Image: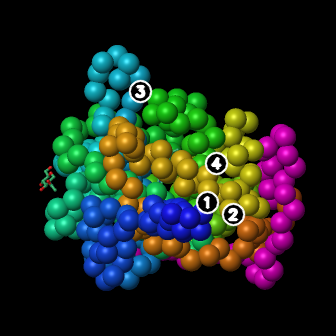
Amino acid sequence: MNFKSILVFIVLSALVYAAPSHVTCSGGRRASEAACCKWFDVLDDIQANLFDGGECGEETHESLRLSFHDAIGFSLSAQRQGKFGGGGADGSMMAFAEIETNFHANNGVDEIVEAQRPFALKHHVSFGDFIQFAGAVGVSNCAGGPRLQFLAGRSNFSRPAPDLTVPEPSDPTNKIFARMGDAGFSPNEVVDLLISHSVAAQDHVDPTIPGTPFDSTPGTFDAQFFVETLLKGSLFPGNGSNVGEVLSPLAGEFRLQSDFAIARDARTACEWQSFITDHKLMVSKFEKVMAKLAILGHSAHDLVDCSEVIPVPSKAKAQSAKLPAGKTIKDIQHACAATPFPVISADRGPATSIAPVPPS
Ligand code: HEM
Ligand SMILES: *[C@@H]1O[C@H](CO)[C@@H](O)[C@H](O)[C@H]1NC(C)=O
Ligand SMILES: *[C@@H]1O[C@H](CO)[C@@H](O)[C@H](O)[C@H]1NC(C)=O
């Protein structure tokens, strides 16, 4: 071989080596591993039949909440003592629904567990995989949403998680941080997890007003939640006050006591404030912390990366949140000692009031 043909040989073998090996799944979609193909079929089914055609609505919110409540059944201190403190993201909430959905903090979770179960059974996937997949697909439907990692291959075997692994909104921050720390999350990572509440509503803290959102844009994955939780509270959207509820700043908006307290806690106030003008940061922090949550009790090495199945969410409209109409900077209870409250624009018009998330 002369020099030129050696060069051609090197280039060609480099090309062959670098060419990604792909398998083609249904609908001509490509996956890196054959094991991922079935998840495209699950995707099509749940987008059409669980999420009402790919909406960021009630089932999406509930599925994201369920991905937390299943996974957080996990305890490092129990492990150290050789006890069983829950298997993490193992599907035990579905396998042992008759036990776990009766725990007080899981109030209302039974509805989404039973809505999801037939899909998991039909597609022969483990309950643990399904719950994390549905949470990731669901939140991808929210405008400006994250594209969460999805690793498949959790065992379908689980044991019931013990009670009291899920924090309550009436818990003091110390108790919440201790419980979350016992699952491996720092206080700032709790804030990162609470980005989920940017697409949230309540049905059970005040059952008389189901569908009451936590911010003015519950269908959008944006930082309005982080601004609005820092506003002075003045009203209850329903008949308040309920356990775990505190005064909210806007008609039709619901405020959890735990969100109020974590937003103002000296340990977490700066992380809270950091998302207000930085949508990119908010998305990347959520993707990172959810990747950790979704595999609690597992090792990534034992799972197959099927993240390519998760849809790419639509782009965010703005990097920065706004003050709701009718509010000024004077209504903000600034709590981050290190950084001034950012300069953000205010929406014009009459004072904001918020419509409930319609049940479907
Ligand atoms: C500090 C810990 C947390 C507390 C105390 C808490 C508490 C709550 C409460 C009381 C509700 C209202 C449920 C209802 O009445 O229907 C709720 C809703 C929700 N939570 Fe959390 N949560 C926490 C962390 C998380 C995390 C880590 C996630 C996900 C990663 C999450 C996702 C959601 C979602 C998406 C909803 C809305 C459900 C819906 O609209 O139906 N939460 N949370
Ligand atoms: C997972 O376990 C449940 C029982 O907890 C069972 O009904 C279901 O068929 C199992 N799924 C798979 C894929 O093995
Ligand atoms: C609120 O409380 C009042 C007085 O107790 C009651 O008449 C009304 O039905 C309650 N509203 C709701 C939505 O439960």
In the image, residue 178 lies in the stretch drawn in magenta = no
Q: Residue furthest front?
A: 2
Q: Cβ(mark 4) to ligand 1 < 8 Å?
A: no
Q: Nearer the viewer, residue 330 or 206?
A: 330
Q: Nearer the viewer, residue 29 or 215?
A: 29
Q: Distance between the Cα atoms at labels 4 and 2? A: 21 Å
In the image, residue 334 lies in the stretch drawn in magenta = yes
Q: Which residues are magenta?
A: 331-360
Who's the residue at 39% across and 30% down the image? 75
Q: Distance between the Cα atoms at labels 2 and 3? A: 32 Å
Q: Distance between the Cα atoms at labels 1 and 4? A: 21 Å
Name the residue carrying label 1.
283
How dense is the environment of label 1, judged by Cα within 10 Å: few (below 14), some, or many (20 and up)? Answer: many
Residue at disc 4, secondary structure: helix
Choose the circle earlier in sequence order: 1 or 3: 3
Give the residue type that dot 4 points to.
Answer: Phe
Name the residue carrying label 3.
76
Give the residue type that dot 2 points to.
Answer: His
Name the residue carrying label 2.
279
Q: Nearer the viewer, residue 188 or 114?
A: 188
Q: Residue 15, image x and y in percent?
A: 50, 67
Is residue 132 something one can see in this rendering? yes
How dense is the environment of label 2, judged by Cα within 10 Å: few (below 14), some, or many (20 and up)? Answer: many
Who's the residue at 74% across and 51% down the image? 273
Q: Nearer the viewer, residue 261 or 339?
A: 339
Q: Are the residues at dot 1 and dot 2 in contact (C-beta closer than 8 Å)?
A: yes
Choose the circle earlier in sequence order: 1 or 4: 4
Residue at disc 2, secondary structure: helix
